[in-house]
Amino acid sequence: MLVTGGNRGIGYAIAQRFVELGHRVAVTARSGEGPEGTLTVRADVTDQASVDAAFTEVEQQLGPVEVLVANAGVTRDMLLMRMSEEDFTSVVDTNLTGTFRVVKRASKGMLKGRYGRIVLISSVVGLYGSAGQVNYSSSKSALVGFARSVTRELGGRGITANVVAPGFIETDMTAALPEEQQAQYKANIPAGRFATPDEVARVVSWVASDDAAYVSGAVIPVDGGLGMGH
Ligand code: NDP
């Protein structure tokens, strides 16, 4: 299996979880390394050639990629009125077009093997919305249409495509938020707390398992109830 952005945060926890379950695990990283027991390859998801090279290296060393977790993502928060076109397109290029690049490359091998599990890491704000995140929330909600279209295209070939939508998770991304804002968010989360990256990883490993063979095109929230009904 391969997870993009597996050198830290949620991607790191996902890689760790799959190692524990006995998978052969590769992570892509622009910097740093994946957890112990993983193969780290360099890749920037904004560059198709770099994505292709990373997949080729993984296939050579570990065999075909049967499970892909498209996790790499960025934020560049700004109120709409102040957001430049570059602020918008750069986030979309990583979060949405980056997903297109890796899924397209992975689907080749999955079609050949007539088996695949594609998991796209979205966010609660994709459907809930968030002031200051027009770029980010657009890129994340688009993953729903993406996974559902992939399901319609490839669902008959043993391939599933699902979206996992985390709420607030304890990572570098949320640590960057001011204390006061963190407390405010927690007050709105029915669970009353942020989640650990491992709590997301466990849902991802389930949706990639044989137990979830008939789950496709689904949006699975891991948000303590924050986005209920969306
Ligand atoms: P982090 O900021 O901790 O990590 C982001 C990861 O994405 C890093 O591994 C980073 O690599 C990688 N990445 C960013 N840009 C690129 C790129 N162009 N090419 C390759 N890799 C890239 O984020 P989280 O772990 O918090 O988030 C992981 C995913 O979960 C993201 O998609 C995020 O949107 C989503 N998410 C996070 C939530 C949270 O509360 N933390 C909530 C909901 C969703 P590098 O270290 O090299 O920059």
Image (tube, rainbow, N blue to C red):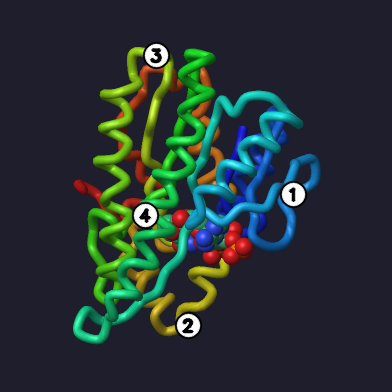
Q: Amino acid at mark 3?
A: Arg
183 above or below 68?
A: below
Query: Which mark sits nearer the N-terminus, 2 or 3?
Result: 3
Query: Which mark sits nearer the N-terminus, 3 or 4?
Result: 4
158 above or below 90?
A: above
Q: Position of residue 115 (x, y in %)?
A: 49, 17
SS for dot 1 = loop
Cα distance in 3D space between marks 3 and 4? 27 Å
Cα distance in 3D space between marks 1 and 2? 29 Å
Q: Report which residue position mark 4 lands on.
A: 123
User: Label 1 neighbourhood size at 10 Å, few (<14), some (14-19), many (20+)?
Assistant: many
Cβ of mark 3 under 8 Å from ligand 1: the answer is: no
Query: Which mark sits nearer the N-terminus, 4 or 2?
Result: 4
Q: Amino acid at mark 4?
A: Ser
Cα distance in 3D space between marks 3 and 1? 32 Å
User: Label 2 neighbourhood size at 10 Å, few (<14), some (14-19), many (20+)?
Assistant: few
